[in-house]
Amino acid sequence: MRDRVLTKVQATVRFVSGMTAPKLVNHKRIHTPKDIIADIRKFYGVQISYQQAWRAKERALEMIRGKPSAGYRQMPRYIYMLNTVYPNSYVRMQNTEEDEFMYLLVALRPLIKGFDYCRPIIVVDDAHMGGAYKGTFVSASTLDGASMVKEYLDDARYEKWSRVHSTVNRGRMMTSNIAECINGCLVEAQQLSILEFLEEVRILFDSWHCKNREIASYTNDTLGRRFEEVLIINASKSSKMEVVPSSEFIFSIYEAGRRYIVCLEQKVCSCGRFQLDEIPCAHAIIVLKEKNVKDMHLYCSYYYKSDVLGKHMRFQWFQCQIRKIGQLLKML
């Protein structure tokens, strides 16, 4: 009789979801339906199906995060709190004619002011987000049916949108796509509700600024640590080069049978690295040594200097009131 009763023991979805919920609080933790099946079998000796485990996980996530639609209803409150915590920010939400969510634009005041100390380069890319409403956060491509885009781009001038005609030296910055970097850091957060996702983005930027500000505060060099290392490496490469002056500012540099031209006045070199990196290349450094120039930082970009990097990280970011941030967190 006892064996007959034990063989009929079952685990309901409600029970399994209650047991699973604590393990799903941290969205970065991977806990699959197969893991749930293994847990129930290990602790209770009960076998459940994959479908039961999947339904239990979905119910547990709903218990923790609520329904996805609720996050969109709370968006106005979240925007109000963002403007309260970060005064003078630019936060705008747009709905469709049917009063459905269309997009949200967030530009926090500390980040806006930080552009004063950044190289004038903006990377535009997708922000990928999963969730219950598939297709809500995707980039859309369409044909220019009205033939308006070409006219708009022509009026904006090629240097505004074409890399080939760009007036800004972007060579070094093209080695890394910051948008892809951000997407990579938010992979686990893509399944969160809209408000939790936005909060993860805010926390990510806060932590980056805190870390970079700390590094900048301990930097005693004229340039930021990364750029100082580049300058040192270039200096070590210049020791075996020969310099032949052509004028006060133009020099020919011979290296391994090849000839390079450096113009100090325009801060360019025929190798291309001086003007693209905005840091003296090895050919420029040997010229500066030949001219007995001690401070090579004068030929580096203004944006690479440690005091400028420090201003970018410090500006108004920590002037936000802690109690207001607490109010923002309580709302989630």
Image (cartoon, grey):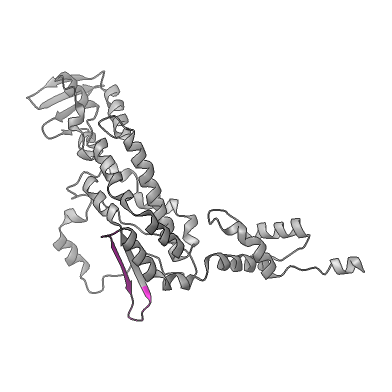
Q: Answer above or below: position of 241 versus 180.
A: above
Residue drawn at x 15%, y 24% is 252
Position of residue 239 in the picture relative to residue 18 (left or right): left
Image quadrant assignment for residue 94 = bottom left
Position of residue 53 in the picture relative to residue 94 (left or right): right
Front residue of 141/3: it is: 3
Residue 119 visible in the displayed image? no
Position of residue 158 in the picture relative to residue 221 (left or right): left
Q: Answer above or below: position of 241 versus 212.
A: above
Residue drawn at x 78%, y 60% is 45
- Marks counted in the figure total 0
Residue furthest front as drawn = 323
x and y, in percent, of residue 124 in the image = 30, 56
Image quadrant assignment for residue 49 = bottom right
Q: Answer above or below: position of 283 versus 188.
A: above
Residue 188 in magenta?
no
x and y, in percent, of residue 264 in the image = 13, 30
Q: Answer above or below: position of 124 versus 252.
A: below
The magenta stretch is 87-101
Where is the N terminus found, in terms of image quarters?
Answer: bottom right
Front residue of 95/245: it is: 95
x and y, in percent, of residue 32 in the image = 62, 58
x and y, in percent, of residue 168 in the image = 19, 46
Residue 99 in magenta?
yes
Residue drawn at x 27%, y 40% is 309
Residue 149 visible in the displayed image? yes
Front residue of 238/308: it is: 308
Residue drawn at x 52%, y 69% is 66
Image quadrant assignment for residue 313 = top left
